[in-house]
Image: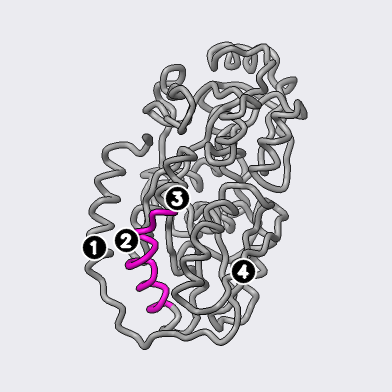
Amino acid sequence: MGLLTRAALGVAASVFALSAAAPALAQEWQPDRPINIIVPWGAGGSTDQVTRVTAPILAEELGQAVVVVNQPGASGAVGTQEVLNAPKDGYTWTANAIANNATYSVTGLVPDTSIDDWHIYLSVANVPVVSVPPDSEFEDFGQLLEAFKERGSEITVGTAGVTSSGGMAIAGLGTEGEFEYRMVTYDGGGPAAIATAAGEAMVTTQLAVEQAELIRGGRLRPLAVLSDQPLTIEGVDPIPPITEWLPEFPIAPDYFGIFIPQGVPEEVVATVNRIWEEKVMNSDALKNYAQTNGAVFAPSYGEEAREVAMPVVIEEACAAEERGLEVNDPSTIGIDCETKSEM
């Protein structure tokens, strides 16, 4: 990912081309008051970071303040439910990893919802990194893997919760590596990474963008990236891919963005489509953010965004089933885990 696989990059490239060809047909929306984007995680995490890069772009075009509101709780479910309950007038949006919004119903955190409850605006793809404090006994992921197998739940892992990117990452590693662990949860990926750097947890598996500054500052030592290619973060030696130790580990890009509930006026969607196509997809600020923090610049919207998002949605829904985390079968959101495809 440096990071996205070639196949994923090919899909993304075709998506961007399609997005560029889609004109906005409805009347331009002119909001008459500020717009709230509820980030259902704590400040400093991956969702919060990238939302604060894109919000000013939207505000400039809309002529109104776009306010980022952190409302953490229940692995992002509290803030997400708040947005679903809000009036569908176009003034309350959310931001997250799309796989979370798409699979909250499977994990039972937000009932009766799916990816198709949202207008999707993706900005970057992120990847988890396995890191330890600088004074850790573990020098590489191979040593950590052996310790997990021998000591299991003695090894503590700091994440933003079971359904967070870090939570799903360690669950996947535990399944593939056949080991136990003990999760310590925080109100966001940033707090989880900071707590691990402070020695509250022995390991973190949160996203690269949540760890980049800590890694650059020598407060975390990265051992592996959950990718099939090395990850380069500006100012840091390349981080080796997890496939050096677990060759069959499933890789799926984790896309983040802003989501507007279905049911808002058509002019809201048409206007945000235009802004995404003309401004966000050409944003130097977003490109710089991705390059500096080990993310992949990958903006898209609409049906094209849904297409690139589905591989990680399917992977996470089926992973929840395999690990016994599901409350509702993935088939209830249209996913067949036998074929790893949409029904």
| Residue to which mark 4 is pinned | 67
| Residue to which mark 2 is pinned | 304
> How many angstroms separate mark 1 from mark 4 (CA)?
30 Å
First along the sequence among labels 4 and 3: 4
Residue sticking out furthest to the right? 200
Q: Main secondary structure of the magenta part?
A: helix
> How many angstroms separate mark 3 from mark 1 (CA)?
18 Å
Extent of the magenta region: 269-285
Please identify, in this view, whether the residue under mark 4 or under mark 3 is nearer the observer: 4
> How many angstroms separate mark 2 from mark 3 (CA)?
13 Å
Q: Are marks 1 and 4 in contact (CB under 8 Å)?
A: no
Residue drawn at the location 34% of the way across and 85% of the way down: 26
| Residue to which mark 1 is pinned | 18
Q: Measuring from the top left, give residue 154's x and y in whole percent.
A: 75, 20
Any part of residue 242 in sight: no
> How many angstroms separate mark 4 from mark 2 (CA)?
27 Å
First along the sequence among labels 3 and 1: 1
